[in-house]
């Protein structure tokens, strides 16, 4: 990735890459989930509660990674169902890759079902590709059973004939726990990369006469791995398309999906319309019948009938109550905009509570930071704010109050009052003529 950040922590539609297979495993009903990490333990902060972390002390291959995880799985089974999220000592062991994010719970369920029906010691998910370059090849025996998987990244790991095979290994496996436990300690690093290949387990099982089954993936895209930023962009496009289609089938109008970005954990209600060039990030929740125009939303909440944009920025903690409106070039942060309230344009509302049916004029600013601490502004119901009003927090404006245009409000405004907080205008007659005479005098 050419990055200081570990590859599997790069974001994919609002979720670190590694959490896609983790979430899929949890959603498929896995009794315990173990993630294998390097000694730096950089993945620990993003793992969901209940997911264990195993450390692979040195980068000695995929077989070494699974070997590092095995003790955690065994302990989960020994500790009983409560400790292992319903763990079953005889349950098959599913192996996924942290950089192969498109495998979903449905595919995992079908794979496990096929594995159990085959009574095999192991099942490998496979796919036949027109261009298998870079993938391990599946070698079958004369009866058609899986004999072994050969790696192809280094010339010494496969023959020319084997590299002609178009059936490839997806890197997704299911093992019977006793078969995996018995084979892992016998792995050898006698290969071109000097690593412990997990694929060697399949060959060891086959040599013992224990059957190895193959499960054909319905769509080759499910096994797409991410090795660089170009690969991440390709996979992101597929994930984003799926997210859009899920929302649209649920009744959300996305006018132009190609210019719309929506993260995976965003919730959007029926009959809401998302217009082009809108980005919706994080855990944003949008109700029914809302309209979002050319705006950027992050970790915010919009109730039914709310309207945003164009060119609005709703930052974390922004709440728009039912039928509220945030208009053009408005930024809202950590603020609660009440039902049917309006912030039409060119304003910044931060750390504020705005009451029902209040209308704030253009250029409204809540001055929420004094250089040391943030303070809150409270604006009541049905307030009419004049254009270019600044509220210097902490300050409270009562219900039905008004502010005069250009006011800098530093004191509380009583209910029903008009706040005029500006210097009285003074005109200087003949000012332009005086300036011109002064300039002429200097030149001469």
Image (cartoon, grey):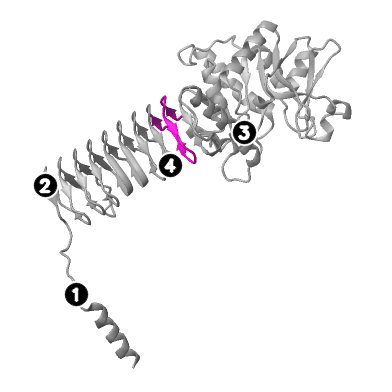
Give the magenta range: 265-286
CB under 8 Å between callouts 3 and 1? no
Q: Which of pointers 3 and 1 indicates the residue nearer the eye?
A: 1
Q: Looking at the rendering, which quadrant does residue 222 occupy?
A: top right
Q: Earlier in the sequence, mark 2 or mark 1?
A: 2
* Secondary element at tag 2: loop
- Residue 15: give x, y in percent of width and height: 51, 33
Q: Which mark is residue 235?
A: 3
Q: Is residue 177 above or below residue 162?
A: above
Towards the viewer: 395 or 89: 395
Please name the residue shown 83% across and 24% down the image.
165
Q: What residue is pinned by disc 4? A: 295
Which label lies toward us, 2 or 1?
A: 1
Residue position marked by numbered label 1 in the rendering:
428
Question: How many residues crowd mark 1 within 10 Å: few (<14), some (14–19), many (20+)?
Answer: few
Looking at the image, how many numbered discs can be counted on the residues? 4
289 to the left or right of 10: left
Q: Is residue 1 within the magenta segment?
A: no
Circles 1 and 4 in contact, beta carbons < 8 Å: no
In this rendering, which labeled residue sits more in front, label 4 or label 3? Answer: 4
Residue depicted at 27% across the width and 81% down the height:
435
Mark 3 vs mark 1: which is more N-terminal? 3
The residue closer to the viewer here, 220 or 206, is: 220
Q: Which residue is mark 2?
A: 417
Using a 10 Å C-alpha cutoff, classify the residue at mark 3 as few (fewer than 14 neighbours), some (14 to 19) or many (20 or more).
Answer: many
Q: Position of residue 439 (x, y in %)?
A: 31, 85
Marks 3 and 1, how far apart in space?
66 Å
Tell me, yes or no, whether the two marked residues, 3 and 2, touch with CB atoms within 8 Å.
Answer: no
Q: CA gap, disc 1 to disc 4?
A: 44 Å
For marks 3 and 2 on the same chain, the one whose residue lies earlier in the sequence: 3
Mark 3 to mark 2 CA distance (whole Å)? 58 Å
């Amino acid at each position: 990735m050419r990055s200081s950040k570990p590859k599997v922590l790069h974001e994919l539609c609002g979720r670190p890459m590694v959490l896609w297979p983790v979430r899929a495993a949890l959603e498929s009903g896995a009794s315990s989930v173990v993630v294998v990490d390097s000694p730096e333990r950089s993945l620990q902060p993003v793992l969901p509660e209940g997911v264990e972390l195993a450390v692979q002390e040195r980068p000695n291959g995929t077989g070494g990674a699974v070997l590092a995880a095995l003790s955690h799985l065994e302990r989960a089974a020994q500790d009983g169902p409560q400790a292992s999220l319903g763990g079953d000592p005889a349950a098959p062991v599913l192996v996924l890759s942290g950089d192969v994010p498109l495998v979903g719970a449905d595919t995992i369920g079908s794979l496990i079902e096929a594995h159990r029906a085959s009574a095999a010691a192991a099942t490998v998910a496979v796919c036949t590709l027109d261009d298998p370059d870079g993938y391990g090849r599946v070698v079958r025996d004369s009866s058609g059973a899986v004999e072994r998987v050969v790696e192809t990244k280094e010339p010494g790991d496969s023959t020319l004939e084997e590299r002609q095979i178009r059936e490839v290994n997806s890197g997704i496996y299911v093992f019977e726990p006793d078969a995996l436990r018995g084979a892992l300690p016998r792995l050898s690093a006698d290969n071109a990369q000097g690593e412990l290949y997990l694929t060697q387990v399949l060959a060891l099982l086959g040599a013992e006469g224990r059957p190895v089954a193959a499960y054909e993936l319905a769509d080759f895209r499910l096994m797409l791995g991410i090795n660089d930023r170009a690969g991440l962009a390709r996979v992101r496009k597929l994930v984003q398309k799926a997210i859009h289609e899920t929302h649209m089938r649920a009744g959300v109008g996305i006018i132009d999906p190609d210019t719309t970005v929506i993260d995976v954990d965003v919730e959007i209600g029926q009959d809401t319309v998302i217009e082009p060039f809108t980005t919706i990030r994080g855990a944003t929740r949008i109700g029914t019948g809302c309209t979002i125009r050319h705006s950027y939303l992050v970790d915010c909440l919009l109730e039914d009938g709310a309207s945003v944009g164009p060119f609005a920025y709703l930052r974390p903690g922004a709440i728009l109550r039912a039928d509220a409106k945030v208009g053009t070039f408005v930024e809202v942060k950590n603020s609660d905009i009440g039902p049917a309230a309006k912030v039409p344009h060119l304003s910044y509302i931060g750390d504020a509570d705005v009451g029902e049916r209040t209308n704030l004029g253009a250029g409204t600013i809540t001055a929420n930071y004094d250089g040391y601490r943030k303070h809150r502004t409270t604006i009541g119901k049905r307030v009419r704010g004049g254009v270019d009003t600044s509220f210097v927090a902490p300050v409270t404006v009562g219900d039905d109050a008004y502010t005069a245009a250009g006011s800098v409000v530093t004191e509380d405004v009583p209910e029903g009052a008009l706040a005029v907080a500006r210097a009285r205008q003074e005109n200087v007659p003949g000012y332009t003529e005086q300036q011109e005479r002064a300039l002429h005098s200097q030149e001469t």
